[in-house]
Image (spheres, helix red, strand yellow):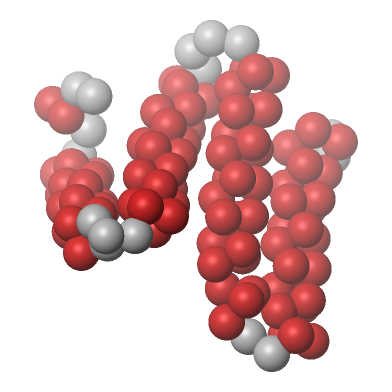
Amino acid sequence: MDFHRHGLLTTLGFAALTGNSALAIYRSRDDPGSVAFVAGAYASIALLFHFLRRFERGEGDRGRTKAAVWLLTTLLTAMFASRVAPLMPPPVGSLVYLMAAGTAGAGFWSMFLHQ
């Protein structure tokens, strides 16, 4: 990542995300599932930043870049919903999954179907 071409706030935000993820992995080192979750979320967010930057600059195939952005945001939504919903009472957990599905569907509609 070329930090010289981006603003200071972007660099600080990415550094904070990296430090927070490293700390979360360190604290969860005895729980492989939590380590995998944090590592997967970090990788997804890093890839999302990459593809959003490509999309903003108009680099590469716009359709594939939009698909990658939608897939990564849907993945992150599903990952976080799967961690939150089991902590809630069953009706609220169902609502969390329903909202996650609605968010993914609305994102698909807005990126690919809406003109």
In the image, taking residue 80 as reference, residue 48 lies left or right, namely left
Whether residue 9 is visible to the viewer of this picture, yes or no, is no
In the image, taking residue 75 as reference, residue 44 lies left or right, namely left
Q: Position of residue 108 (x, y in %)?
A: 77, 42
Whether residue 2 is visible to the viewer of this picture, yes or no, is yes
Q: Position of residue 14 (x, y in %)?
A: 23, 45
Q: Is residue 27 above or below residue 37?
A: below
Residue 112's quadrant in the figure? Answer: top right
In the image, taking residue 107 as reference, residue 14 lies left or right, namely left
Q: Nearer the viewer, residue 95 or 104?
A: 95
Q: Is residue 30 above or below residue 93?
A: above
The residue at the point 34 percent across, 60 percent down is 31
Name the residue furthest bottom. Answer: 89
Q: Position of residue 80 (x, y in %)?
A: 54, 62
Name the residue furthest top. Answer: 60
Q: Nearer the viewer, residue 34 or 94?
A: 34
The residue at the point 62 percent across, 76 percent down is 86
Q: Position of residue 77 (x, y in %)?
A: 60, 55
